[in-house]
Image: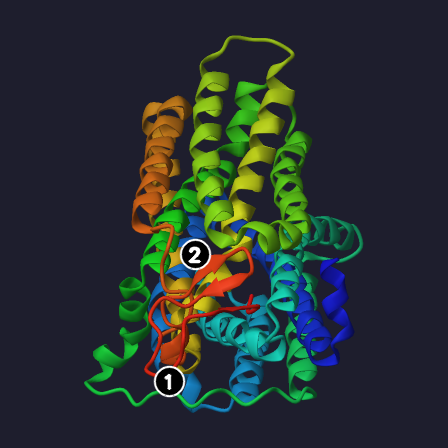
Amino acid sequence: MPSSVLRDPVYRRLFTAQVVALVGTGLATVALGLLAYDLAGADAGAVLGTALAIKMTAYVVIAPLVGAFADRLPRRALLVGADLLRASVAVALPFVDQVWQVYVLVFVLQSASAAFTPAFQAVIPDVLPEERAYTRALSLARLAYDLESLFSPALAAALLTVVGYHRLFTGTLLGFLASAALVASTTLPRATAAAPRTGGAYAKATAGTRLFLAVPQLRALLALNIAVAAASALVTVQSVFYVRDFLGLGAGAVPLALGAYGAGSMAVALALPRILERSGDRPVMLRGGLLLAVVFAATGAITAAGSGSWRLPALLAAWCAFGAGCSMVLTPAGRLVRGAAPDRERTAVFAAQFSLSHACWLLTYPLAGWVGAAAGPGVAVAVLGAVAAGAALTATRLWPARVPARPADAPAHVTGAVRVPSGRRHGRPRPGVRPSADSSP
């Protein structure tokens, strides 16, 4: 079970820090929407759309900059500092009275998140070096994200029955302070010394991205990120239309659709650790990308169909399948980055994955909204489905069945190892070492 890794005291504290910070972020998301309505009225949607674009821009720009220097900073100080910066934004948000102030604070908040998240992700492989434990940690993290998306809005709704929405920012503040306290009280493993980087600031900031794009399976991951972004954009942007206009249901049914997406994602996250032990990352992730393309085709058929009571269960099934396909890609992604990146470059490559994946969302979110508004949801499904299918097929071509199984800083005798029934066969032995099979994972 994924929860077995919680027996490790260091990981248990880090995971708890992640969960409380996620809850705080979820409360802030609800409160920001209400704050935008207070400040802009009917234009609140435009304010939130701009804030979302600022969030994604911060992720895309700031994460590589931090990744270039994160390995030269004390890990605990970086994580605690990012949490305290996020907490300071939570303190300031209730007092803003201008839209531009919201934009500035959102940029600061998300820049701190762009520093925290890749550094946090890079710590976990050192806390849980055994591959089976790390896989279960990734499954647990996926569950945490999905549960937060369901729990935080419900908690916010409950709190709003007794307090004003400004009080939700207090929950955000407490979440970030609790996360900082948990990380500060934890002894983190020492990071592998980073390789010296030459060149100017641009070369250092893009080092992780260039390494990311140089590895076949990571290039395939980028293509799969595009497929995931297309699916999640459709679910996020168009769920309200499908529930309210297409099905003619009330606003209360919107969480039902989003819950179906989360349920599909969580079910896969629970099942994946054992599946990955048997099959490895490549089959699961590529099939997840292809599943998204198939579900887009099914959603197009549902959209084009006439009336009928079958449409609600069909839509919920499609949304559930979208969640499953996304989880098949996203849950093992950390394993892929960990296995393909040299230890000394791990934080920079995690930062590149964080930045590039959010760049995909930065493209697909407005695409889903603009095409849907201009040409209708059927065309939006077709366009996003074509993007997802093209990305999934590209990933299949980019990721050959046999690639070097160890990062670039591994000993030469394991470079080029391939899986065999008894373990791995080493393809290019170093002088004096005979090719053999071992039991490495």
Q: Earlier in the sequence, mark 1 or mark 2?
A: 2
Question: Residue flagged by tag 1: what amino acid is it?
Answer: Phe
Q: Residues within 10 Å of mark 1 (few under 14, many from 20)?
A: some
x and y percent of residue 31 in the render?
A: 61, 56
x and y percent of residue 118 in the render?
A: 48, 71
Query: Is residue 162 among what the camera can see?
Result: yes
**Distance (Cα) linking label 1 and label 2:** 27 Å
x and y percent of residue 189 in the render?
A: 59, 87
Question: Which image quarter holds the N terminus?
Answer: bottom right
Q: Residues within 10 Å of mark 2 (few under 14, many from 20)?
A: many
Vertical placement of residue 343 versus 271, above or below: below
Kindly identify which numbered label has been placed on residue 51: 2
From the viewer's perspective, is the residue at label 1 or at label 2 nearer?
1
Vertical placement of residue 165 versus 254, above or below: below
Q: Quadrant of residue 54?
A: bottom left
Q: Quadrant of residue 107?
A: bottom left
At horizontal 43% and vertical 51% (from top left) the residue drawn is: 47
- Drawn side of residue 284 relative to residue 7, left or right: left
Kindly identify which numbered label has been placed on residue 69: 1
Q: Circle 2 sits in a helix, a strand or a loop, which is it?
A: helix
Vertical placement of residue 157 versus 355, above or below: above
Question: Residue flagged by tag 2: what amino acid is it?
Answer: Ala
